[in-house]
Amino acid sequence: MTSKAVDYLQAHREAMLDELNEFLKIKSVSSLSEHKADVVEAANWLERQLLHAGMEKVEVIPTEKHPIVYGEWLKAGEDAKTILIYGHYDVQPVDPLHLWETEPFQPTVRDNKLYARGASDDKGQTFMHIKAVEAMLKSEGELPFNVKFLIEGEEEIGSPNLDGFVEAEKERLRSDVLVISDTPMLEPGKPAICTGLRGLAAIELTVKGAKGDLHSGLYGGAVPNALHGLVELLGTMRNKDGEIAVPGFYEGIEALADEEKESLAALGSGDESMKAETGVSALVGEKGYTSRERTWIRPTLEFNGVFGGFQGEGVKTVIPAEATAKITCRLVPGQDPEDILAKIEQHIEANTPAGMSVTTQRHDTGKPFAAPVTDPAFAAAARAYEKVYQTEVAYTRMGGSIPVVETFDVQLNVPIILMGFGLPSENFHAPNEHFHLENFDKGLETILAFWEEYNKLG
């Protein structure tokens, strides 16, 4: 990495953090319609940042929902390597608000951690790549490679419009490597290159009983209770060993290669660190697997929200007519989200309680992804991490999803390097999301080091 670029980062650190705070104040919640203007504001903010960094060409590209931001610097020429950087500027909702120690869109630093929605996922990490490019261009005047940015505003809702864009714009996005920073390190001080992501399948179901809520004294014990029915139905989806009981759910799952099995085993179970990190006294899940295996290489079916009946203070003696559950499944290679949703719908139909009906609504989907690590770009990323963090890098999978990665893999056919700088404990998607500023600083240097190592490959 060039000493001039590192000097630039150090000299402008506070100004960069001020800019990041501006970005984090924008309420770019993609799933809520009341924040549509905020999402556009965030896209326009990124446009200005990319231009300030020195991009030759920047566009805010409208879609049917939220804009895509594209930028490029191609002055290195046709014979030079081209690096494509992907990130997202949309964020999750902040509920429940009362659990935040400080306002989610008022960035606050405590104990060298930056607290705000999006600080780690993914505004902070995307911002770092822009600043690294800026440092190179402002200090050196040029780059030894071409660079393209593709930053979307719909990742948190499943990237519904990005797949089509990538397929239609393959030539515009043509590159030699794709770099994404939206994954966690293994633990503090232990960097990780992520080689696989789980897919996603989301569904909402509503159980309906009587035509309206009923008096529990007059009708209780005789008329179907929608909440009882929902609980009964949900109870059929898992068994006592933590296995998912939806018929065919595990069909087609690809076995791990022996090399990856050995690599995973060498990292240990992670059970004790996960208990300490989450504050629970025991772990649960599919029998026969460690916590790392359960969260990285096994599929899940989770209840994300269950509601119905009276929600207010005190007691209201009613038999609810409706009850709803929101479910998401994390999927692994060999599983298709549409197939899984169809199997869940069939299971619901076969297990609908007597006297009730069930309606379903499908939501976000994303396909799983796993990458071979034989391309020299992975070794270049490992050397960059090890140069800055002074420790051996881990090769991991991530339990979460980045829906468009599988599309990138199919459509662009380039190595995809998932090199993140967040930590598993940083509360992405939860109250008090934060980003360790130590990894902001080291991450910027690691990005520069990766570019240097990658450019050496010839």
Image: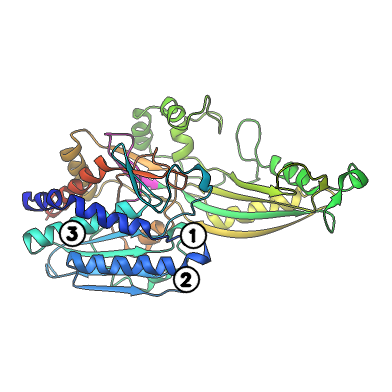
In 3D space, how far apart are the residues under numbered discs 2 and 3 (Cα atoms)? 29 Å
The three-letter code of the residue at mark 3 reads: Val
Q: Pointer 3: what residue? A: 133
Say what secondary structure mark 3 lies in: helix
Q: Residues within 10 Å of mark 2 (few under 14, many from 20)?
A: some
In the rendered structure, does residue 295 fall within the stretch colored magenta? no
Which badge, 2 or 3, is on the more N-terminal residue? 2
Q: Looking at the picture, how far across and down is residue 441, in whole percent?
A: 21, 45
The answer to which of 284 and 406 lies nearer the viewer is 284
Q: Pointer 2: what residue? A: 65
The three-letter code of the residue at mark 1 reads: Ile
Cβ atoms under marks 2 and 1 closer than 8 Å? yes
Q: Residues within 10 Å of mark 1 (few under 14, many from 20)?
A: some
The three-letter code of the residue at mark 2 reads: Lys
Magenta span: 179-196
Say what secondary structure mark 2 lies in: loop
Residue 276 visible in image = yes
Q: Is residue 155 above or below residue 72?
A: above
- For the C terminus, the image quarter is bottom left
The answer to which of 286 and 107 lies nearer the viewer is 107
Q: Residues within 10 Å of mark 3 (few under 14, many from 20)?
A: many
Q: Pointer 1: what residue? A: 157
Which badge, 1 or 3, is on the more N-terminal residue? 3
The answer to which of 181 and 374 lies nearer the viewer is 181
In the rendered structure, does residue 192 fall within the stretch colored magenta? yes
- 352 to the left or right of 364: right
